[in-house]
């Protein structure tokens, strides 16, 4: 319904694994975002891409590596994660981050568990 | 620092009215958003306020007072499906969204 899809919906991985999260938006938006959502904490913005260019990297550890091949697709590559990285990872898209009225539309998230 | 405060959890009765408050301290202001998030699902957009006053949208209304750094979301005629978390977010002077931790609303029959 929101036009933003994410796969997989659930992921369990060991600390030595490498995995990737995928996000796709069907809304024709120009910007895409990765957020981390932990219980009882505010959404943490991780990365922002606007017209495929990374515009934000909020001091995210290098074990998280984003990739944005085009305005419709966004990936988050994961490697050597820590148990504290377990969280819900949300993808969002919006039309124009430079406008006050710009509304972000979210995907359903990937529930990540790091063992 | 920038900060958004909202109650962690609220309980209300089906058919009643509930008001969820949000106070904010941010570097500048370019609008305030409310989102609804059911457990295990995507946050969905509810409302946007940039001017003072009340915006009504069906059973939901959102109020803003910029001078007080305060907003509330008013839900009327509560239904069981309104059980969800409600997220408040403010767009600051750099057009960044600053998020609150969310208010979990529990509706009882």
Image (cartoon, rainbow, N blue to C red):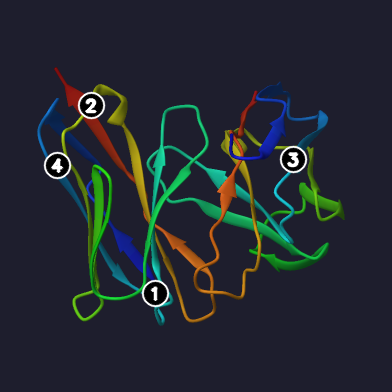
Cα–Cα span, label 2 and label 3 = 32 Å
The chain letter under disc 1 is B
Q: Do labels 4 and 2 share a chain?
A: yes
Classify residue A50 by image quadrant.
bottom right
Q: Residue at x 49, y 65 (%)?
A: B97
Number of the label disc, if any, that sits on residue B62: none
The chain letter under disc 4 is B
Residue A7, compared with residue B97, is above or below; it is above
| Residue A77 pos. (x, y %) | 81, 42
Which element is circle 2 on?
loop
Mark 2 or mark 1, earlier in chain: 1
Cα–Cα span, label 4 and label 1 = 30 Å
| Residue B85 pos. (x, y %) | 34, 38
User: Which dot, 4 or 3, sits closer to the camera?
Assistant: 4
Which element is circle 3 on?
strand
Front position in the image: B25 or B31: B31
Q: Name the residue under label 4.
A: B18
Quadrant location, the C terminus of chain A: top right
Q: Name the residue under label 1.
A: B1
The chain letter under disc 3 is A
Q: Which residue is drawn at 69% across and 58% down?
A: A47
Number of the label disc, if any, that sits on residue B79: 2
Q: Which residue is drawn at 43% across and 76% down?
A: B30
User: Which dot, 4 or 1, sits closer to the camera?
Assistant: 4
Quadrant location, the N terminus of chain A: top right
Which element is circle 1 on?
loop
Residue A47, compared with residue A110, is above or below; it is below
Front position in the image: B16 or B100: B16
Residue contact between numbered discs 2 and 3, judged by CB atoms under 8 Å: no
Mark 4 or mark 2, earlier in chain: 4
Q: Name the residue under label 3.
A: A23
Residue contact between numbered discs 4 and 3, judged by CB atoms under 8 Å: no
């Amino acid at each position: 319904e929101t036009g933003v899809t994410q796969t997989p919906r659930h992921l369990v991985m060991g600390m030595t694994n490498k995995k990737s999260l995928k996000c796709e938006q069907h809304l024709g938006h120009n910007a895409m975002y990765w957020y981390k959502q932990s219980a009882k904490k505010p959404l943490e913005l991780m990365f922002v891409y606007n017209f495929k260019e990374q515009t934000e990297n909020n001091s995210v550890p290098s074990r998280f590596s984003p990739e944005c091949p085009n305005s419709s697709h966004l990936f988050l590559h994961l490697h050597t994660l820590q148990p504290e990285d377990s969280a819900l990872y949300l993808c969002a898209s919006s039309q124009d981050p430079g406008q006050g009225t710009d509304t972000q539309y979210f995907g359903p998230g990937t529930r990540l568990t790091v063992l | 620092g920038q900060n958004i405060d909202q109650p962690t959890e609220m309980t209300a009765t089906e058919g009643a009215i509930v008001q969820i408050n949000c106070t904010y301290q941010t570097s500048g202001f370019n609008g305030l958003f409310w989102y609804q998030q059911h457990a295990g699902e995507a946050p969905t957009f509810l409302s946007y306020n940039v001017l003072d006053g009340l915006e009504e949208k069906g059973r939901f209304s959102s109020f803003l007072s910029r001078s007080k750094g305060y907003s509330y979301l008013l839900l009327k005629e509560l239904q069981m499906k309104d059980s969800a978390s409600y997220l408040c977010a403010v767009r600051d002077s750099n057009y960044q969204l600053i998020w609150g931790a969310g208010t979990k609303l529990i509706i009882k029959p």
